[in-house]
Amino acid sequence: MSDFDALSAAHSEVKAEIARTDTKASLLLAFDGVALAGLWTVGGQPWVPLPARLTGSVAVLMLLASVTLLLLVVRPRISPTAAQAGFPRWAKLSAGELTAELATDRTASHVVALSGIAMAKMRGLQRAVNLTLATSGPLAVAALLAAGDAL
């Protein structure tokens, strides 16, 4: 495999990883929205005891924090590193400057910039998933409190 082929493959791989991360974040965002709607519906019922509501509100706050992280994952960012490579930089060029820019192979710098973006997105997604998973603790306690009060 030539250096050009390897760079091209790396460039395609990192772009695909960004797309996969955005897709995962979108799916988790939808899940968190459904979970929040369900918690709001159940928590608003008159038969839910106050201790269960208070404990469930911790889970709601955790889900809202997860939603915030997910929105930051999918939020468009133009970092100084990314602005030096590819699209953001191209937006400021004239047609002649763009033609000259494209004649220069900057694939390696693009891969580096995109890899940084992908890693930041993955870290944010990982934190959001961990936070969403952690909501099961307060939800379990809230369910036990509600069940205990019903008995």
Image (tube, rainbow, N blue to C red):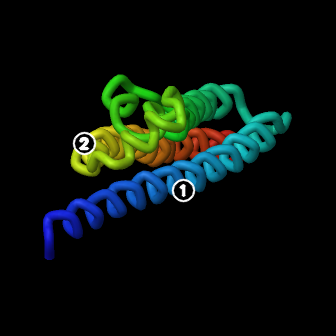
Q: Secondary structure at mark 1?
A: helix
Q: Is residue 105 left or right of residue 68?
A: left
Q: Secondary structure at mark 2?
A: helix
- Measure how far apart labels 1 and 2 are at the Cα level: 25 Å
Seen as rendered, the residue at the extreme bottom is: 1
Proximity of marks 1 and 2: CB atoms separated by less than 8 Å: no
Which of discs 1 and 2 lies nearer the camera? The answer is 2
Work out whether residue 19 or residue 55 is closer to the camera in this orientation and state it.
19
Quadrant of res 112: top left
Of labels 1 and 2, earlier in sequence is 1
- Return the x and y of residue 26 as percentages of the image width and height: 59, 50
Mark 1 surroundings within 10 Å by alpha-carbon count, few (fewer than 14), some (14 through 19), many (20 or more): few
Work out whether residue 52 or residue 86 is closer to the camera in this orientation and state it.
86
Work out whether residue 102 or residue 31 is closer to the camera in this orientation and state it.
102
- Relative to residue 5, is residue 65 depicted above or below? above
- Relative to residue 81, is residue 17 depicted above or below? below
The residue indicated by pointer 2 is 109
Three-letter code for the amino acid on which mark 1 is drawn: Thr
Work out whether residue 135 or residue 120 is closer to the camera in this orientation and state it.
120
The residue indicated by pointer 1 is 23
Three-letter code for the amino acid on which mark 2 is drawn: Ser
Q: Residue at x 38, y 57 (%)?
A: 17
Q: Residue at x 23, y 60 (%)?
A: 7
- Return the x and y of residue 84 as percentages of the image width and height: 34, 30
**Camera sees residue 85:** yes
Seen as rendered, the residue at the extreme front is: 96
Q: Which quadrant of the rendered structure holds the N terminus?
A: bottom left
- Return the x and y of residue 123 as percentages of the image width and height: 34, 41
Q: Residue at x 56, y 35 (%)?
A: 71
